[in-house]
Structures are given as C-alpha cells and as structure tokens.
Amino acid sequence: MDNKEYEAKVKDEICDVCHKMWQLGWVAANDGNVSVKLQDGTFFATPTGISKSFITPEKLVRIDVEGNVLEGLPGYKPSSEIKMHLRCYQEREDVGAVVHAHPPTATGYAVAHKSLDSYNMIETVIALGSIPVTPYGTPSTYEVPDAIAPYLGEHDAVLLANHGALTVGCDLITAYYRMETLELFAKINLTATLLGGAKEISRENIDRLISMRDGYKVTGRHPGYKKYNTEEEK
C-alpha cells in the first residue's frame, strides 16, 4: 500500500468511526472529535463545527504538531479541543489515535465526578483497568490538556469532569474500541448499582486477568500493570 492509499484508508476509518459515534448517540450537533497520527508525523483531524454524521474524507484537515492547518478545504480548521489531542501524542509516543466523545452513561459518571475505579468486570479489568475522572478544565483552553497529562502515563481511557470521555490507542480502531468498552462498562456499573452494588473480583484473580494482556497482545497502558508500562517506556 503506497502512502496515498494508506492516507485514503485512514480517512475512511475516521469517517466510519465518526458515523458510528453519532449513530450510537455518543455525540450530538458538532460534539466530539477524532484525530490520527500519520507516518510523516502530521495528523488528520475532524473539523470544527460539523456533525460527525456529516463527516466525509474531503472535510478532514491535516495539521502539524502545533495544530496549524497544512491541508483542508477553505475555512476548515480543527476543533479548538485539538490541544487535548496533541497533548496525548506529546505525552505518549505509542499513541496513534485519539477519540473524544460524550457517551451518555460514561459522561454521566464524569458529570457526577464518579470515577469507574472498580475491578468488577473481566473484560474491562484486562482492557482498561480503573478509569479516573480528570480535573475540570475549560474547553478550548490549555486547562484540559494540563488536566489530563498526569493520567496519560497509566491510562488509555479517562473521564473528563463535567465534559465527556477520552480514549487513546495505537491506532484509530483501538481507540474507538476503548470508547465502546468504557461506555458499556459505565452502563453495567450503573445497572449493578441499581441492583445493590457491583461485586469486586478478588485481588488474586485481578492479577491473573491483568497478566493475560500479554497473551491477548493488548497494547497501551494499564494502571495495574507496572511491568508492562516499564517495558513500553524502554
């Protein structure tokens, strides 16, 4: 696959993810944003002011590491929240894509300032571990990237206080899957709370589940897997 074909594929994936997020009700109006790091160190990003249901490949913009537009339709520019995306890439060399959305149940936890820090669902224990709520930050300012930066070293998914959710991945599909996992986990925890409370998995079994990440070839970071984090940073 040559570079032109590769970039066309990435654009198609971004559009597909945007449409899925809208169909799932994770975004409304012009909410949410998606970005992908390209092989040359530049990025494709969704433009500001456009519903994710209307995103098409030609509407995406290419930006540099400072958020300057390198390619795009006249008048098109990335979301002011691109600062948050760029901080993720700056803090983590392994990050190849960033997804920001407002999935309703997970965002409910963010609005309530309740972290999803229970190790009670097998798949989430393996994939994400605990999911913290980062401090409040005013959108479009550097408050948000500064608020999330301390959490990126150990987490691939975070809740943004009074705002929404953010996930990162080695590629776009991985980042998108993590947002799916986060929202489902939030729904299940809410249901468990209504049923009297979720039951934690034992420490021994938590350790066994986390150790399975290697076998499943799970990329990224995990707050309960220091060995994995250390090896990635070498």
Image (cartoon, rainbow, N blue to C red):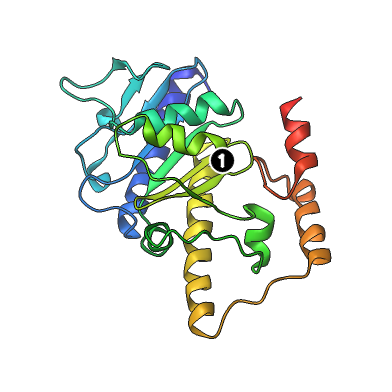
Could you tell me which residue is drawn at 44 percent across and 18 percent down? 42
> Number of marks in the image?
1
Q: Residue furthest bottom?
A: 195
Residues packed near mark 1 inside 10 Å, few (<14), some (14 to 19) or many (20 plus)? some
Residue occupied by mark 1 = 151
- Who is closer to the viewer here, 37 or 55? 37
Q: Residue at x 30, y 29 (%)?
A: 60
**Label 1's element?**
helix
Q: Nearer the viewer, residue 87 or 216?
A: 87
Q: Amino acid at mark 1?
A: Tyr
Residue 216 percent across, percent down from the top left = 74, 50
Question: Who's the residue at 32% across and 49% down the image?
Answer: 19
Q: Nearer the viewer, residue 212 or 84?
A: 84
Q: Name the image quarter holding the C terminus.
A: top right
Task: Look at the picture and state if 180 lies above or below 234.
Answer: below
Q: Is 6 placed above or below 68 here? A: below
- The picture quadrant where one finds residue 138 is top left
Q: Position of residue 78 (x, y in %)?
A: 28, 28
At x 43%, y 17%, the residue is 65
Across and down, in percent, residue 166 comes to 45, 45
Residue 129: image location, x then y, percent: 64, 55
Is residue 97 positioned above or below 93 on the image?
below
Residue 201 sits in quarter: bottom right
